[in-house]
C-alpha cells in the first residue's frame, strides 16, 4: 500500500542523521533527486484509483516537503560546521586579511625624504660624533670665546676646562661639527649633507626639546656662489613641499657664514594666502644658510682664496611638524602608538 510506504519513509527521514557531505549527498539521491524514492512514488500516482488519488497526492506532498526541509537543515548544519574547521575555510575568492605592519617614525620618513632629494642633486651623506670637542662644535666654526651659545644654559658640557685653551667636551649643539671634520680630512670639491641628533639644554615644551634632529648641507668648491645656494634650496623646496613652492631669503647672522640668510618657503597649508600655521604671513621659515665664512675654511685647512662654499641647516622636527600639521614637539618622543599609527604607509 502506498500510504503505508509513505508512513515508513516519513519515519525513516525523521530518524535519519547526516554528519558529512557524503551522507548529505546520499540523502539527496535517495529522497530528493529525480531517481529517488519520492519521485518514484509520484510516478506511481497515475496507477492509483481516481477516488484515492487526491488523498495519496497530499500524503506524497507532505513526504516531499519533509525530505526537502530536512535536506536544507542538514546542509545548513554542515556548512556552519565547516566554517569553524580551519581546513575547510579556504576560499580563494575572499579578500585577504592584511598583516599587521609596523610603520616608520614620521621623523624617519622626513629624514629619508630630505636625504633622497639631496642625493639626487649629487650630495653624499656624512655622519659624525654626538659627543664632541669644543673645537669642532664652536671654535673652528668661528664662535667667539664669549659667544652666548657656549654658555651653560644652552650647551650640555661633559667636562669644562679652566685655562685659555678650550678643550671642553660637550654634546654637540648642531650637526655643524661634521662639516668641520669633513673639511679637515677631505679636499674640495665637498658636497655632503649631515643628518643627526643634536642636544641643547632647554626645558621640554610643545615648541622646544633638549634632543632634536638636524640636517646640514655643505658645498665647497671653486666658484661656488650665493646663486648656487639659492638654486639648491629652491629645488629642495619644490621637491619637498610641491612644485608651486617659492622661497624667500631674509638677511640673518650666523658666526660660521657670511653673508647669512634665513630661508622661508611659501606656506603649503594656505599656499601663501595666510593661515594660523604661517601666522598670516604666507611664509614659513625652514632653514638657516649662508656662504661659509673664510675663517672657517682657513680653520679647516682649506685655502679660502681658492675655494668658496655654502652651508645650510634645517630642523627635521620643524619640517615634519609643518608637513603633517603636528603642533606638539613632545609627540615625537612619547612613543604613543595612536600617534605613530597615523603614519602607516606615509
Ligand atoms: Zn599659511
Image (cartoon, rainbow, N blue to C red):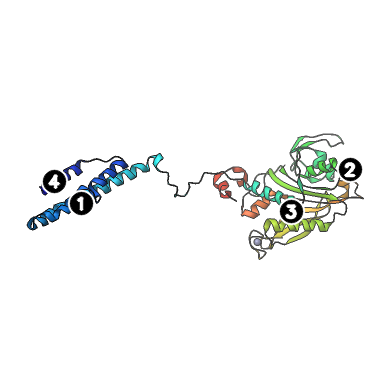
Q: Which mark is drawn over residue 39?
A: 1
Q: Earlier in the sequence, mark 2 or mark 1?
A: 1
For the residues labelled 3 and 4, say whether their Cβ atoms are less than 8 Å apart: no
- CB atoms of marks 1 and 4 within 8 Å: no
| Distance from the alpha carbon under mark 1 to that under mark 4 | 13 Å
Question: Crowdedness of circle 3 by 10 Å Cα count: few (<14), some, many (20+)?
Answer: many
Q: Tell me the quarter of the picture where residue 165 sits.
A: top right
To which residue does mark 2 refer? 301
The residue under label 4 is 5
Ligand 1 is located in which of the four quadrants?
Answer: bottom right
Q: Mark 2 or mark 4: name the one nearer the start of the chain.
A: 4
| Label 2 residue SS | loop
Q: Secondary structure at mark 4?
A: helix
Residue at the (17%, 50%) spot, across then down: 41
Q: Nearer the viewer, residue 326 or 84?
A: 84
Question: Mark 3 and mark 2: span between their CA atoms?
Answer: 27 Å
For the point 73% across and 55% down, which residue is it?
Answer: 236
Q: Is residue 21 above or below residue 281?
A: above
Alpha-carbon distance for marks 2 and 4? 113 Å
Q: Which residue is mark 3?
A: 287
Q: Residues within 10 Å of mark 2 (few under 14, many from 20)?
A: some
Amino acid at each position: 500500500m502506498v500510504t503505508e510506504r509513505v508512513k515508513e519513509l516519513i519515519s525513516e527521514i525523521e530518524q535519519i542523521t547526516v554528519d558529512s557531505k557524503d551522507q548529505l549527498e546520499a540523502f539527496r539521491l535517495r529522497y530528493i533527486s529525480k531517481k529517488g524514492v519520492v519521485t518514484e512514488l509520484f510516478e506511481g500516482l497515475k496507477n492509483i484509483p481516481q477516488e484515492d488519488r487526491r488523498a495519496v497526492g497530499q500524503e506524497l506532498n507532505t513526504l516531499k516537503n519533509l525530505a526537502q526541509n530536512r535536506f536544507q537543515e542538514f546542509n545548513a548544519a554542515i556548512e556552519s560546521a565547516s566554517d569553524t574547521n580551519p581546513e575547510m575555510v579556504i576560499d580563494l575568492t575572499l579578500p585577504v586579511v592584511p598583516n599587521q605592519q609596523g610603520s616608520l617614525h614620521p621623523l624617519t620618513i622626513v629624514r629619508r625624504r630630505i636625504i633622497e632629494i639631496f642625493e639626487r642633486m649629487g650630495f653624499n651623506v656624512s655622519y659624525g660624533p654626538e659627543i664632541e670637542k669644543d673645537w669642532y662644535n664652536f671654535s673652528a666654526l668661528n664662535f667667539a670665546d664669549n659667544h652666548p651659545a657656549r654658555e651653560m644654559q644652552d650647551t650640555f658640557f661633559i667636562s669644562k676646562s679652566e685655562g685659555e685653551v678650550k678643550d671642553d667636551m660637550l654634546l654637540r649643539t648642531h650637526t655643524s661639527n661634521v662639516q668641520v671634520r669633513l673639511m679637515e680630512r677631505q679636499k674640495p670639491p665637498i658636497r655632503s649633507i649631515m643628518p643627526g641628533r643634536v642636544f641643547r639644554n632647554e626645558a621640554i615644551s610643545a615648541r622646544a626639546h633638549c634632543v632634536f634632529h638636524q640636517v646640514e648641507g655643505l658645498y665647497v668648491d671653486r666658484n661656488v656662489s650665493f646663486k648656487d645656494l639659492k638654486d639648491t634650496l629652491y629645488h629642495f623646496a619644490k621637491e619637498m613641499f610641491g612644485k608651486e613652492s617659492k622661497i624667500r631669503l631674509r638677511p640673518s647672522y650666523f658666526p660660521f657664514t657670511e653673508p647669512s640668510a634665513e630661508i622661508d618657503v611659501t606656506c603649503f597649508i594656505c599656499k601663501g594666502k595666510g593661515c594660523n600655521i604661517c601666522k598670516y604671513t604666507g611664509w614659513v621659515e625652514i632653514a638657516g644658510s649662508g656662504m661659509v665664512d673664510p675663517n672657517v675654511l682657513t680653520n679647516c685647512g682649506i685655502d679660502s682664496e681658492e675655494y668658496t662654499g655654502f652651508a645650510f641647516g634645517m630642523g627635521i622636527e620643524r619640517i615634519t611638524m609643518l608637513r603633517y600639521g603636528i603642533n606638539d614637539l613632545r609627540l615625537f618622543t612619547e612613543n604613543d602608538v595612536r600617534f605613530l599609527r597615523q603614519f602607516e604607509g606615509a
